[in-house]
């Protein structure tokens, strides 16, 4: 028995519902690497990079929405292969080039542009250039290659969050990219099955309008979400102030952390620690402090700015919980922390440059050092107390 019109209608609305759910889930900020993924890739080989690439693409809903828009009205295998290959070449070039040369852009901005690319492809599908702008649309093949280059920057920015191997960097990147393509092919096959089913329906024209206008809406909402994330990351102090006000209104006790330029001028530090972070690597440095203890600190690099997350973990906690006090990208920082709980407190630094970076950390307070010497030589994964946290996403 052939499927009925109601079957196609239900299939369409189910698909749209799933897309909405995906876009408004925690995966809306696409391509976030989980803590488990980061830890597994440290010990895994190229097959692990390939697997992460595949799963990464399948959770990258902005990229998948763009591919869906590309193939929406394509019916021949030749056309599908041509346009999908153009997109693949575009994002592969920038993924490999940018990662290999440690080129990083703000991932919120990149993902915001990727969201606009979804709007663009859907706008082209409804012939919006002629209908609303009264102009001929740009060459679609060239636009897909260009937009693919932008998508590649987004993939590269997320890939560089991983501790990539300097000795096998190019092979790691290629393995990840192969996984990306395998994930894209898997998603593409499902999309084509759905589109073939919809095309058999008499209501396909209506379906196509709803689907492409929905893509424009989804892309626009995702753009706003990414720009909100960008604003949050570039104006963290303003958002921190709002958070403190909210805590006061709710009666919660805020964590006392203050910035102070005077601290960097102090000469009577208890300890001065040197931390060297290899190229394309990361390290954590932790101290143990009791609740309501005070820690004064000032650190600076020998030149390069690093991403850092100043955070703490409660003693005895096994759930993986941690509280982030300050997150930024800079070459220096100083301040005073009054600890909200007993446990380990310290810094996660990530070096995305192609050269080692040395940090000089000065500290003073009622703390217990967890390292045994002035120079940190241990692998952060081998230190018993500190944990590696997914604080970048």
Image: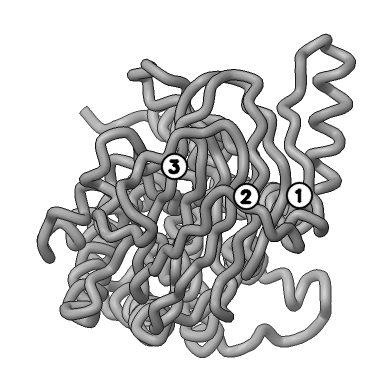
- Tell me the quadrant of the picture where the N terminus can be found: top left
In terms of depth relative to the viewer, which is nearer, 78 or 319? 319
In the rendered view, does 39 fall on the left or right side of 370? Answer: left
- Res. 330 mark: none
**Residue 10 at x, y percent in the picture:** 45, 27
Q: Nearer the viewer, mark 2 or mark 3?
A: 3
SS for callout 1: helix
Front residue of this view, candidates 118 and 132:
118
Q: Please tell me which residue is depicted at 49% across the width and 81% down the height of the picture.
A: 103
The answer for how far apart the CA atoms under marks 3 and 1 are is 23 Å
Q: How many marks?
A: 3
Q: Which residue is mark 3?
A: 286
Q: Residue at x 37, y 65 (%)?
A: 159
| Rendered position, 94 above or below 10 | below
- Residue furthest top in the image: 251
Q: CA distance from mark 2 to mark 3?
A: 16 Å
Residue position for label 2 = 327
- Vertical position of residue 27 compared to residue 73: above or below: above
Of labels 2 and 1, earlier in sequence is 1
From what the image shows, is residue 223 above or below residue 151? above
Numbered tag placed on residue 236 in the rendering: 1
Mark 2 or mark 3, earlier in chain: 3
Q: Residues within 10 Å of mark 2 (few under 14, many from 20)?
A: some
Residue under the image location 29 percent in, 77 percent down: 81
Name the image quarter holding residue 163.
Answer: bottom left
């Amino acid at each position: 028995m052939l499927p009925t019109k109601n079957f196609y209608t239900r299939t369409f609305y189910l698909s749209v519902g799933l897309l909405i759910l995906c876009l408004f889930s925690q995966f809306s900020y696409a391509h976030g690497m989980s803590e488990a993924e980061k830890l597994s890739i440290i010990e895994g080989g190229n097959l692990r990079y390939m697997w992460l690439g595949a799963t990464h693409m399948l959770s990258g809903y902005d990229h998948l929405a763009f591919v869906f828009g590309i193939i929406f009205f394509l019916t021949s295998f030749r056309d599908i292969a041509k346009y999908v290959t153009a997109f693949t070449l575009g994002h592969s070039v920038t993924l490999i080039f940018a990662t290999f040369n440690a080129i990083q852009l703000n991932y919120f901005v990149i993902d915001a542009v990727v969201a606009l690319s979804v709007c663009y492809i859907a706008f082209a599908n409804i012939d919006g250039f002629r209908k609303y702008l009264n102009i001929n649309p740009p060459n679609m093949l060239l636009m897909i290659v260009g937009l693919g280059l932008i998508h590649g920057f987004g993939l590269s920015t997320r890939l560089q969050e991983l501790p990539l191997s300097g000795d096998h960097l190019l092979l790691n990147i290629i393995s990840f990219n192969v996984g990306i393509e395998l994930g894209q092919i898997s998603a593409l096959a499902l999309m084509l099955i759905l589109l073939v089913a919809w095309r058999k329906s008499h209501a396909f024209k209506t379906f196509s309008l709803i689907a492409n206008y929905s893509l424009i809406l989804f892309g626009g909402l995702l753009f706003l979400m990414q720009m909100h994330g960008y604003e949050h990351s570039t104006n963290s102090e303003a958002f921190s102030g709002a958070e403190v006000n909210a805590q006061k209104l709710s009666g919660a006790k805020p964590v006392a952390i203050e910035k102070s330029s005077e601290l960097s001028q102090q000469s009577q530090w208890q300890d001065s620690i040197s931390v060297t972070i290899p190229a394309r690597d990361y390290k954590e440095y932790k101290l143990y402090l009791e609740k309501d203890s005070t820690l004064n600190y000032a650190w600076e690099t020998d030149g390069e700015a690093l991403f850092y997350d100043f955070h703490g973990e409660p003693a005895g906690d096994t759930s993986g919980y941690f509280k982030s006090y300050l997150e930024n990208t800079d070459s220096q920082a100083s301040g005073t922390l009054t600890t909200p709980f007993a446990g380990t407190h310290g810094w996660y630094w990530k070096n995305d440059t192609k050269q080692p970076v040395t940090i000089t950390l000065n500290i003073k307070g009622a703390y217990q050092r967890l390292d045994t010497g002035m120079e940190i030589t241990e692998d952060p994964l081998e230190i018993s107390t500190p944990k590696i946290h997914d604080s970048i996403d």
